[in-house]
Amino acid sequence: MKKIILLIVVLLAAFSFYWFKLRSKSSGPQEPKPAPMLVKKHSDSFNKTINNVVANYLELKDAFVEADTAAVKSKVSAFLTSLNQVDTIELKKDTSLVFETVMATIGDIKSNAESLQKQTDITEMRRDFSSLTDVMYPTFFIAIKYEGPKLYLDNCPMAFSDSIPANWISSSAEIINPYLGKKHPKYHAGMLGCGEIKDSIEAK
């Protein structure tokens, strides 16, 4: 009888040991799961040409913030050059619909940029910049399957005549309005922070 009781005690002790050991392992801190890696759809050279387009757009936007028409002319020229350098040969590897959509979109962007380049009044320049932005977002970024750094689509509700809205693209979540800018004839720099983020643009 004593042997049976002793055997039961040993079995209970063994069971308790394994039970608490397994529980401590399962309830302990879990290792973080690795984030899924972005599967690139394009070559580095293609993405570099797209990033150059974006960089030149952002510099053009900054020139509008400063209300510097000479800088605007210079930056829009650089922007057009970068558009002409997009690696369209790589796009031909995709479907004909994708290629045609991207080429048509680039053509529309160029048309607005060339119109902007011919303007002398900064308000008219800003109107063309607004149209250019509306072609870039979302059509251009969707068509090329954008893989660059995160961007933001911002909106000013009173860009023109205090009542007509307009969008712009930014690399920062901070609102710095290129339509009301630092040298606005009515508001001066008082409305520089006017606007809100409407969307974000990032690789999927």
Image: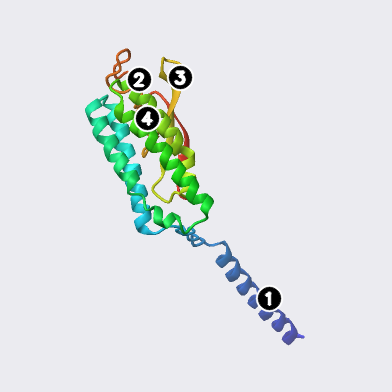
Q: CA distance from mark 4 to mark 3?
A: 14 Å
Q: Are marks 3 and 2 in contact (CB under 8 Å)?
A: no
Mark 2 Cα shell of 10 Å, populated few (<14), some (14-19), many (≥20): some
Query: Residue 191, labelled with which disc?
Result: 2
In this rendering, does residue 121 appear at all? yes
Q: Of label 3 and label 1, which has the lower sequence position?
A: 1
The residue under label 3 is 164
Query: Residue 185, labelled with which disc?
Result: none
What residue is shown at x 35% (from left), y 22% (from top)?
124
Under mark 2, the amino acid is Met
Viewer-side label of 4, 3: 4
What residue is shown at x 45% (from left), y 41% (from top)?
105
Percent across and percent down for residue 168 are: 40, 32
Q: Of label 3 and label 2, which has the lower sequence position?
A: 3
Q: CA distance from mark 2 to mark 4?
A: 19 Å
Q: Are marks 1 and 4 in contact (CB under 8 Å)?
A: no
Q: Are marks 2 and 4 in contact (CB under 8 Å)?
A: no
Q: CA distance from mark 3 to mark 2?
A: 15 Å
- The one nearer the camera, 130 or 18, is 130
Viewer-side label of 3, 2: 3
Would residue 197 be found to the left or right of residue 122 on screen? right
Q: Secondary structure at mark 3?
A: strand
